Image (cartoon, rainbow, N blue to C red):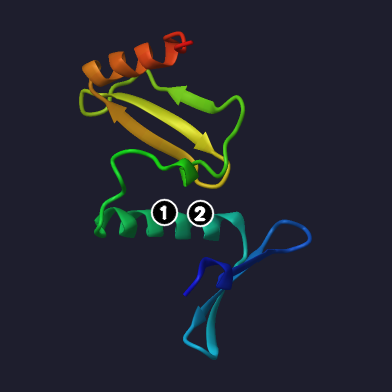
Amino acid sequence: MADQDWRGVISDDGQAAVMTIPQGRSEEATIVFHGAEDLDRLIQMVSVLRAQMTPPVPETPRDSDIPMSTTPPVWAALGTRTDGKRPLLLRHPGLGWVGFLFDDESAAILAAALTSRPAR
């Protein structure tokens, strides 16, 4: 089944969505989302399922892995530690808030990577 066979439509008022997925040659499944909260629940559920599947998400990003972005990105580095780690949240326009926990060493490496001058 090719990706182009999947269809999604947003209502004129932007408050609802319909997703249609082919099921064999002549049938299809239709899911109606009556609000953004419904779609948020689906995204959450699908991400939990994906995390349990094989093969795992690749260790390094592919060129096609950044289809949507925000400039500048909206983020929050929370001051309170979680499980002894530093929380960082990034807001993605389609996925919502995505959180990460960094140990001190990883946080330092990330900070250095974000503040280093690009090679010329």
Q: Nearer the viewer, residue 3 or 9?
A: 3
Residue under the point 32% across and 60% down:
49
- State the residue position of label 2: 40
Q: Amino acid at mark 1?
A: Gln
Residue under the point 46% across and 41% down:
63
Residue 95, above or below 120: below
Residue 37, above or below 99: below
Q: Are marks 2 and 1 in contact (CB under 8 Å)?
A: yes
Q: Nearer the viewer, residue 40 or 47?
A: 47
Q: Nearer the viewer, residue 75 or 81?
A: 75
Residue with the most extreme bottom position: 26
Q: Amino acid at mark 2?
A: Asp
Q: Position of residue 91 (x, y in %)?
A: 51, 35
- State the residue position of label 1: 44
Q: Position of residue 109 (x, y in %)?
A: 30, 16
The quadrant holding residue 48 is bottom left
